[in-house]
Image (cartoon, rainbow, N blue to C red):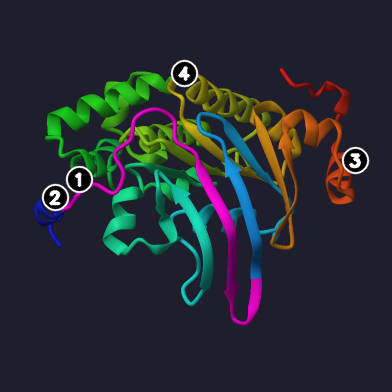
Amino acid sequence: MTMQNRKNRAMEREPVVETTGPQGIEIEHLNLELGGKRLLDDVSLHIEAGKVTGLAGESGSGKSLTSYSILQLYPEGSSVSGKIMFAGRNLLVLDTEEITEVRGRQIAFVFQDPSSSFHPMISILGQMTDHMRYHLHMNRQQAAERAQELLDMVEIPDPHGALHKYPHQFSGGQLQRIAIASALACNPKVIIADEPTTALDVTVQAGILQLLRDLCDRLGTTIILVTHDLGVMSALADNVAVMREGHIVEFGTRYQVLREPKHPYTRSLIDALPMNMGGFDDE
């Protein structure tokens, strides 16, 4: 389907969700099976509007699969039940065109490896403006101006010049900032960040985490942060859910989970951190 045809179809369709103010997500009794194995088991989670909610756990705990399920990005052949409610609609039952309207427009994704988020042969301008033109029906100039504003917001030097560069011309930290700018392009209500700092060094990691925190505080963006690192949670999350083997074993505020954990698994994760847990607070 051509860009113009897609645009015409999008304009003919009633928008899936057009909302004002922060929006949260309610995951209710989410189950996911693949190949006869249950990978998510009765997952229920309140994603508070305008806050950062962390999904923590070891590899294979189900945290990434839970976040991907919000946009129906689970593996082909999966059997899924339950509800994921956003703006009054169950995202799990939307058809392909409806969920495509939600992706990027209302809920955006920031992936773990910034280099894999971009096509190496297309300029940053081309990659940032395509979905703005599709979702927001902007012309080229409007989309380019919006892209430049976003790069300035995430503190990319010389935003105008950066638009005409290619991904290999940026550092990993800069690319992750550009990926976050791209996620913000259509003013989404929710950003899902899947291990957004794992591939970055400690100094750059701190800057990305501060950027996400600022976006939440300034724009009221609801952020779902997926990470195995409770140290990252302590720097960013308002609420934390701990997952193990497809279950949520603990949920609460950052202070409750990191300072007063109730589940032995949470305590084991905290004890494995090479840092003083006394530094965590509820500020």
Seen from this angle, which residue lies furthest front?
Answer: 88
The residue positioned 60% from the left and 66% from the top of the image is: 31
- Circles 3 and 4, Cβ within 8 Å, touching? The answer is no
Q: Is residue 238 magenta?
A: no
Residue type, label 3: Asp
Q: Does label 2 or label 3 sit earlier along the sequence?
A: 2
Q: How crowded is mark 3: few (under 14 residues within 10 Å), some or many (20 or more)?
A: few
Q: Which of 33 and 18 is in front in this view?
A: 18
The image's mark for residue 134 is 1
- Give the Cα separation between the discs numbered 4 and 1: 26 Å
| Element marked by disc 1 | helix
In the rendered image, which quarter is residue 269 located in?
top right
- Circles 2 and 1, Cβ within 8 Å, touching? The answer is yes
The residue positioned 89% from the left and 47% from the top of the image is: 268
The residue positioned 30% from the left and 21% from the top of the image is: 149
Image x and y of residue 120, in percent? 35, 48
Residues drawn in magenta: 10-38
- Give the Cα separation between the discs numbered 4 and 2: 31 Å
The residue positioned 36% from the left and 19% from the top of the image is: 152
| 112 lies above or below 48 | below
Residue hosting label 3? 271
Residue type, label 1: Tyr
| Element marked by disc 3 | helix
Q: In this view, does 206 lie to the left or right of 72?
A: right
Point out the frontmost of discs 4 and 1. 4
Q: Does label 4 or label 1 sit earlier along the sequence?
A: 1
Residue hosting label 4? 218
Q: Does label 4 or label 2 sit earlier along the sequence?
A: 2
The image's mark for residue 272 is none
For the C terminus, give its image quadrant: top right
The image's mark for residue 7 is 2
